């Protein structure tokens, strides 16, 4: 068996897939995967607004109830790459449906949990199921769509990612407002059950029955190394609220060393001609993958933590209810949803320039919002800031979906699961950094000066640092692509002879 060689150009990929026959059910199947993906990502943030009532009703300590959020994020991130590789090797449809079924089951267990211990255990299992489901989403898009259609499909996928992150607080607030009472928080989990059951039934009918590579072997030692490395990096971050970074900061260098060992091990596996868990050549030879992963990770550092900062400022600083706090940031979600769908149609024409413009829009929107919250009268500041947040949301819609499209478009379909899992692992790590660092800075500034305005400005300024770094990386890639594009123009015969991804026995 020879090792696989990822393609280095999109045109070679298109030539290789010339025999592709579109599934007439592909757009309906896409909506099944998007609904499932929306639920799994929404559950990262929707639970946060219900933590106070959970803690009171279950008589839990702050450290225990924090695991309801952080435990889900941890197991979610741990599963992604391994789940993607299993989908590539076996059957993405089967793994997706099994993971979705598990997600629904554990959502019901979370809702019915009589004590905090069972709730935390169920959340860990729910996060694991979500982690197995997530990489199959992007891989199924790779499998079902080609060419311009793939860009539009990823546009919808990017809208789902952006909206689910921004809509968590308002959705949780709305559920708590409707399901008032001692056990109202349980409906934050129960709401997944009917939607998930419908998605499973439709998925069984609509998702394509295409097998993977047929090689069920998974690099077990690679799974162990990657899992330990991600765990070491994530654990202090998910425990940041209870002092985890100060207590176990030494896990960061250990995690970095283990991940470096993982990379070396994967190179050794490839050199032997065996199947790696994550082929290192994705980062070195697939055009746009490494930079796209970096852009996504840096963006999510700022993007994910912003919503917690807004929730803290509006609820603690201005006395808003969870629902009203969520409504105050809804313009960003609306702008992101509108722009992401349009971006899917523009990405083939504008390429990385679309991401550059989007990041500039997000920076302008969040920076303008910070200034308005600082200088405008607090009675009207949230509403004056709404149009500026909408502008930032439009920028965000031009970031997530185009970046996913450009990062994955040249990845061979047979490696789409592992590649999508690695991309989302980077995003989850970035999100963990942001959700730990930004609220921490907010509380630090608030403790020093007891000034809610100053605290929100400092936290948003820190978020902008990550986004400016993401913009610099995207601009570099855009300029590089402009310089090398003329050299990659090929005649039809050259396209036909382009390097391809091959798996031979």
Image (cartoon, rainbow, N blue to C red):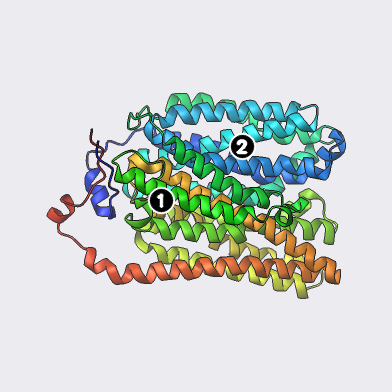
Q: With respect to residue 111, does 436 lie above or below? A: below
Residue 264 marker: 1
Disc 2 crowd, CA 10 A, few/some/many (<14, 14-19, 20+): many
Q: Which of the 4 image quadrants contains residue 492?
A: bottom left
Residue at coordinates 55% horizontally, 38% vertically from top-left?
131
Residue at coordinates 69% horizontally, 61% vertically from top-left?
438
Disc 1 crowd, CA 10 A, few/some/many (<14, 14-19, 20+): few
Q: Is residue 199 visible?
A: no
Q: Which of the 4 image quadrants contains residue 121?
A: top right
Q: Which residue is mark 2?
A: 127
Question: How far, Cα to Cα, is label 2 from label 1?
Answer: 28 Å
Q: Secondary structure at mark 1?
A: helix
**Residue 318 at what x, y percent from top left?**
84, 61
Quick check: 464 left or right of 404? right
**Residue 239 at what x, y percent from top left?**
71, 49
**Residue at far bottom of view:** 375
Q: With respect to residue 240, does 461 lie above or below? A: below
| Residues under numbered marks 2 and 1 in contact, where contact means CB atoms less than 8 Å apart | no
How many numbered marks does the figure carry?
2
* Front of the two marks 2 and 1: 1
Which numbered disc flags the more N-terminal residue, 2 or 1? 2
Q: Which of the 4 image quadrants contains residue 484?
A: bottom left
Residue 423 marker: none
Nearest the viewer among 177 and 13 is 13
Q: Secondary structure at mark 2?
A: helix
Nearest the viewer among 238 and 473 is 238
Residue at coordinates 66% horizontally, 68% vertically from top-left?
462
Quick check: 60 left or right of 422? right
**Residue 5 at what x, y percent from top left?**
27, 47
Quick check: 170 left or right of 151? right
**Residue 140 at what x, y percent from top left?**
41, 38
């Amino acid at each position: 068996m020879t090792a696989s060689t990822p393609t280095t150009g999109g045109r070679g990929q298109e030539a290789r897939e010339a025999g592709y026959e579109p599934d007439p059910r592909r757009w309906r199947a896409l909506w099944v995967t998007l609904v499932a993906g929306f639920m799994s990502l929404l559950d990262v943030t929707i639970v946060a607004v219900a933590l106070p009532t959970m803690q009171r009703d279950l008589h839990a300590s702050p450290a225990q109830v924090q695991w309801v959020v952080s435990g889900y994020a941890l197991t979610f991130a741990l599963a992604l790459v391994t789940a993607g590789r299993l989908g590539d090797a076996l059957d993405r449809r089967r793994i997706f449906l099994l993971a979705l079924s598990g997600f629904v089951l554990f959502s019901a267990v979370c809702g019915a949990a009589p004590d905090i211990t069972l709730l935390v255990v169920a959340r860990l299992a729910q996060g694991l199921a979500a982690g197995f489901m997530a990489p199959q989403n992007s891989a199924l898009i790779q499998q079902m769509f080609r060419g311009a259609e793939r860009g539009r499909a990823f546009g919808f996928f990017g809208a789902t990612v952006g909206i689910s992150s921004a809509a968590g607080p308002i959705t949780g607030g709305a559920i708590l407002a409707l399901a008032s009472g001692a056990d109202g928080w349980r409906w934050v989990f129960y709401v997944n059950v009917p939607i998930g059951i419908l998605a499973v039934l439709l998925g069984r009918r609509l998702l394509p029955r295409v097998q993977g590579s047929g090689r069920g072997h998974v690099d077990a030692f690679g799974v162990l190394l990657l899992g330990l490395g991600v765990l070491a990096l994530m654990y202090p971050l998910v425990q940041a609220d209870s002092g985890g970074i100060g207590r176990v900061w030494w896990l960061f260098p250990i995690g970095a060393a283990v991940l470096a060992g993982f990379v070396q091990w994967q190179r050794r596996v490839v050199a032997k001609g065996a199947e790696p868990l994550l082929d290192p050549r994705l980062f070195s030879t697939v055009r746009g993958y490494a930079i796209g992963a970096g852009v996504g990770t840096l963006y999510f550092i700022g993007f994910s933590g912003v919503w917690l900062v807004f929730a803290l400022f509006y609820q603690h600083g201005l006395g808003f209810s969870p629902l009203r706090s969520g409504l105050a940031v809804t313009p960003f979600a609306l702008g992101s949803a509108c722009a992401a769908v349009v971006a899917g149609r523009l990405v083939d024409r504008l390429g990385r320039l679309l991401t550059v413009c989007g990041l500039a829009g997000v920076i302008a929107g969040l920076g303008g919002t910070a200034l308005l919250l600082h200088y405008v009268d607090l009675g009207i500041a949230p509403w004056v800031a709404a149009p500026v947040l909408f502008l930032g949301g439009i920028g965000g819609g031009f970031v997530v979906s185009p970046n996913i499209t450009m990062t994955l478009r040249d990845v061979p379909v047979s490696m789409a699961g592992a590649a999508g899992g690695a991309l989302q692992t980077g995003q989850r790590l970035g999100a963990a950094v942001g959700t730990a660092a930004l609220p921490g800075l907010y509380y630090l500034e608030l403790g020093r000066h007891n000034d809610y305005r100053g605290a929100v400005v400092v936290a948003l300024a820190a978020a902008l640092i990550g986004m400016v770094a993401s913009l610099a990386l995207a601009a570099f890639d855009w300029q590089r692509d402009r310089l090398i594009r003329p050299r990659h123009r090929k005649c039809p015969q050259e396209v036909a002879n382009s390097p391809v991804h091959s798996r031979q026995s």
